[in-house]
Image: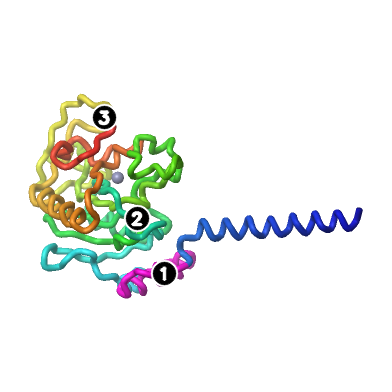
């Protein structure tokens, strides 16, 4: 009896070790540098991986800035790295682009992404003036949707982005995130408009008057309009991504994530999106 018990105990222990090993191996996307990562991202990657648990020093992080994926002769782009990213399961399997708005200034967005770990991030922000900030290299997944591997939050996600042989697949793995610097809903205040944080929006911003037909956009009757140059640069950036990754599904955060409203009613969806949720 004793020998039998011991053998059972031994088998149990071995299974437990194997199970834990499996968890470590399957959950830890951070353990290795992707083989095909360009050397320029290695310092940044290593810095982020080794400082996530001990606090990130913004000065040191900025010293590790990676080289932008965009051609600097084509785009006015500046790198402001964030450590909020993970390895994609397949480094180059990009299938879609998710459009967001920042809900405030570009600077408050990227400085939040640099300061806050864990937190949110996006690959790109297109500023109101058409210049671009890149915060995460395309080879990594940014934290921009918030499905938490749960299709209850993201049930509308198209199969191409979220279905992996019948299982829900996190769309952050398969997408590029583009934020547009934009206040979203704005509120009349002393003759001008403020954003949801009560900060005035720029004097030269245009206001989009919303007709209130969709209850999703109940926050305000007024939204900041996207600037012309911003939309021109967005068009160019999408064309650049499609040239590099092939045809992509282009959609908004609100098309995937049930409680998100961005990029909102002021965004010209018909012009840009090739996927719209019902
Ligand atoms: Zn969003």
Question: Mark 1 or mark 2: which comes first in sequence?
Answer: 1
Q: How many numbered markers are drawn? A: 3
Tell which tag, 1 or 3, sits nearer the viewer.
Answer: 1
Whether residue 139 is situated above or below residue 248 in the rendered picture: below
Alpha carbons under labels 1 and 3: distance apart = 44 Å
Residue 198, quarter of the rendered image? top left
Alpha carbons under labels 1 and 2: distance apart = 16 Å
Instruction: Read off the residue under disc 2.
Output: 142
Whether residue 126 is situated above or below residue 198 in the rendered picture: below
Q: Are marks 1 and 3 in contact (CB under 8 Å)?
A: no
Tag 2 secondary structure: strand
Q: What label sits on residue 33 in the rendered view? A: 1
Whether residue 43 is situated above or below residue 69 in the rendered picture: below
Q: Residue at x 18, y 64 (%)?
A: 77
- Would you say residue 252 is visible in this rendering? yes
Q: Residues within 10 Å of mark 2 (few under 14, many from 20)?
A: many
Q: Is residue 166 magenta?
A: no
Q: Residue furthest right?
A: 1
Taking the image as shown, residue 136 lies to the left or right of residue 182, namely: right
Alpha carbons under labels 2 and 3: distance apart = 28 Å
């Amino acid at each position: 009896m004793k020998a039998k018990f011991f053998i059972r105990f031994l088998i149990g222990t071995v299974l437990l070790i194997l199970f834990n090993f499996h968890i470590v191996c399957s959950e830890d996307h951070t353990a290795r540098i992707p083989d095909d990562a360009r050397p320029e991202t290695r310092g940044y990657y290593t810095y982020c991986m080794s400082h996530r648990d001990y606090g990130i020093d913004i000065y040191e992080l900025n010293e590790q800035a990676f080289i932008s994926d965009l051609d600097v002769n084509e785009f006015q782009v500046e790198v402001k790295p964030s450590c909020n990213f993970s390895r994609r399961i397949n480094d180059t399997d990009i299938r879609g682009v998710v459009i967001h708005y920042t809900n405030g200034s570009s600077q408050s967005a990227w400085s939040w992404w640099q300061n806050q770990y864990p937190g949110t991030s996006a690959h790109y922000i297109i500023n109101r003036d058409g210049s671009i900030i890149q915060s995460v290299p395309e080879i990594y997944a940014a934290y921009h949707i918030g499905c938490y591997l749960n299709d209850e939050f993201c049930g509308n996600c198209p199969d191409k982005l979220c279905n992996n042989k019948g299982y829900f697949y996190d769309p952050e793995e398969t997408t590029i995130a583009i934020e547009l610097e934009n206040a979203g809903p704005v509120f009349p205040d002393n003759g001008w408009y403020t954003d949801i944080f009560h900060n005035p929006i720029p004097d030269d911003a245009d206001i989009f008057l919303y007709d209130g037909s969709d209850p999703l956009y109940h926050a305000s009757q007024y939204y900041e309009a996207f600037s012309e140059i911003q939309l021109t640069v967005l068009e160019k950036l999408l064309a650049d991504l499609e040239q590099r990754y092939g045809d992509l599904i282009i959609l908004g955060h609100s098309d995937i994530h049930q409680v998100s409203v961005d990029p909102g009613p002021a965004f010209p969806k018909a012009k840009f999106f090739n996927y719209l949720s019902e």
